[in-house]
């Protein structure tokens, strides 16, 4: 009997690996999710093909594609995995057990400055849960969530997607930052029009915060001189600290620098400018008790 149960569990794991491969369309990502080598994923698929006596994946270097048999297996496998995970989650609830792993992907500014207090608080309450945080560009966070590479993501300016559930986290005030010796550093408040013509250190054009700032500047007819563009908050702050230019960033990201007097922060007068953040996860995803508790904690930030 125990051998039969073990065999069935092995089949469940094989189906999970297959689903991970299909959803990520990548042997490398599927291997990363399951903590095995890419070769092991290939071998597992080969075993399944022998078991079902059908090719499941088209061997083409151009793009990942399933065979008709592979698509049929994937449709049924998703149902089986969802049922299995729901059963496992309900069993944990019955036993009142909060344990396991939570995989989170986020951008640097949220992961370094916003998320840590929540993770620490959660770990104090649930020490048997391991929260793994991975840093990604915003676009990659969405891809990893949709591909089940991670359980959930934290993003700024969340983009609507019919395949995702979006849970508001909180709004971060945007402030002007500059070198302590910059003329703006003497001000408590500044109007947006004062930024016109100033040397500006910005995010790269595809970064959500950059897109939002571009809209704000356009609305107020403000044109700045971009002297540098970066993909993460730490590099932006570093450039402002050596007086390369000014910038506008979430207030929570510059607390330490302001305290150390390496940066000066100035409130923008023209209105309340915020960066909204949110938690995203795949629709119909079976949430473990640990994930539900972590989401509940993150909702407190709203």
Image (tube, rainbow, N blue to C red):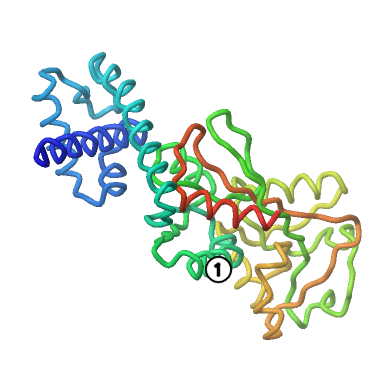
The residue shown at (41%, 59%) is 132
| Of 165 and 221, the residue lying toward us | 165
Q: Which residue reaches farthest front?
A: 94
The residue shown at (57%, 64%) is 118
Number of numbered labels in the structure image: 1
| Of 112 and 137, the residue lying toward us | 112
Residue 167: quadrant of the picture: top right
**Is residue 70 left or right of 183 when viewed as pictured?**
left
Residue 289 % position (x, y): 46, 49
Residue 224 appears in view: yes
Q: Is residue 83 above or below residue 195?
A: above
Q: Which residue reaches farthest top?
A: 68
Badge 1 element:
helix
Q: Is residue 47 above or below residue 94?
A: above
Q: Residues within 10 Å of mark 1 (few under 14, many from 20)?
A: few
**Is residue 57 left or right of 160 when viewed as pictured?**
left
The residue shown at (82%, 78%) is 185
Residue 92 % position (x, y): 39, 48
The residue shown at (22%, 25%) is 60
Residue 182: quadrant of the picture: bottom right
| Of 63 and 282, the residue lying toward us | 282
| Of 166 and 37, the residue lying toward us | 166
Residue 204 % position (x, y): 60, 52
Residue 112 % position (x, y): 55, 66
Q: Which residue bears the numbered disc 1?
A: 121
Residue 234 appears in view: no
Q: Is residue 83 above or below residue 263?
A: above
Tell me the quarter of the image containing the N terminus. top left
């Amino acid at each position: 009997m125990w051998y039969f149960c073990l065999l069935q569990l092995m089949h469940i794991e094989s189906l999970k690996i297959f689903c991970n491969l299909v959803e990520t369309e990548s042997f490398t990502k599927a291997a990363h999710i399951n903590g095995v080598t890419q070769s092991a994923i290939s071998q597992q698929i080969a075993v399944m093909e022998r078991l079902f006596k059908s090719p499941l994946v088209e061997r083409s270097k151009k793009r990942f594609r399933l065979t008709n048999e592979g698509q049929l297996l994937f449709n049924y496998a998703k149902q089986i995995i969802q049922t299995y995970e729901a059963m496992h989650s309900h069993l944990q609830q019955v036993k009142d057990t909060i344990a396991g792993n939570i995989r989170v992907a986020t951008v640097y500014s949220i992961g370094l400055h916003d998320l840590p207090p929540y993770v620490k608080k959660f770990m104090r309450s649930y020490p048997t849960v391991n929260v793994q945080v991975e840093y990604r560009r915003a676009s990659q966070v969405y891809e990893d969530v949709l591909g089940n590479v991670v359980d959930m993501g934290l993003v700024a300016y969340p983009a609507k997607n019919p395949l995702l559930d979006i849970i508001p986290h909180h709004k971060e005030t945007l402030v002007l930052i500059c070198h302590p010796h910059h003329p703006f550093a003497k001000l408590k408040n500044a109007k947006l029009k004062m930024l016109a013509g100033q040397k500006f250190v910005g995010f790269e054009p595809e970064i959500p915060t950059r897109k939002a700032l571009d809209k704000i500047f356009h609305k107020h007819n403000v044109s700045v001189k971009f002297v540098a563009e970066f993909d993460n908050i730490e590099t932006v702050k570093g450039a402002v600290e050596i007086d390369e230019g000014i910038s506008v960033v979430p207030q929570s990201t510059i607390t330490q620098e302001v305290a150390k007097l390496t940066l000066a922060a100035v409130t923008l007068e023209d209105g309340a400018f915020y960066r909204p953040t949110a938690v995203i996860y795949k629709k119909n995803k079976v949430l473990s008790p640990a994930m539900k508790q972590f989401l509940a904690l993150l909702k407190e930030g709203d």
